Amino acid sequence: MDIVKLARSSGLQILLDARIGRETYHSVSGSLSSLQRFADAIRAALEDERADSLVPLERSEA
């Protein structure tokens, strides 16, 4: 899950603050409605990941 991509697509503004070594630090700003869209997008992405990881059990007829 790319949370930076989800944040941008939700309408949040992503700013590059600093890069120290291999770590990149960002600030995020936006409206409360953008934050709500981001939270909804995270929830949906987690539900999709969970659904993809579930393997249906095969029934054996005895």
Image (spheres, grey):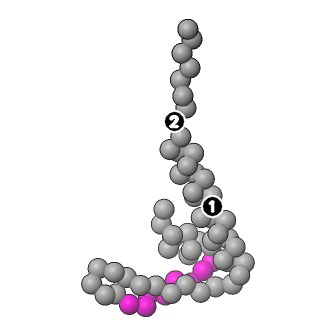
Q: Which region is colored magenta? A: 11-18
Q: Nearer the viewer, residue 10 or 21?
A: 21
**Element type where label 1 sits in the image:** helix
Q: CA distance from mark 2 to mark 1?
A: 20 Å
| Residue in the picture at 51% in, 70% down | 3
Residues at badges 2 and 1 in contact (C-beta under 8 Å)? no
Report crowding for label 2: few under 14, some 14 to 19, many 20 or more residues within 10 A (C-alpha): few
- The residue wearing badge 2 is 55
Residue sitting at x 37%, y 82%: 24
Residue 13 as seen in the image, left or right of residue 18? right
x 53%, y 40%: residue: 54
Left or right of residue 53, residue 42 in this image: right
Q: Residues within 10 Å of mark 1 (few under 14, many from 20)?
A: few
Amino acid type at mark 1:
Arg
Residue 21 position by quadrant? bottom left
Q: Amino acid at mark 2?
A: Val
Task: Please state the horizontal and vertical placement of residue 31, each as a whole percent of the image.
Answer: 69, 84
Q: Say what secondary structure mark 2 lies in.
A: loop
The image quadrant that residue 36 belongs to is bottom right
Residue at the spot 51% in from the left edge and 36% down from the top edge: 55
- Residue 49 spot, x, y in % from top left: 53, 51
Q: Which residue is mark 1?
A: 43
Residue 53: numbered disc:
none
Direction top: furthest residue: 62
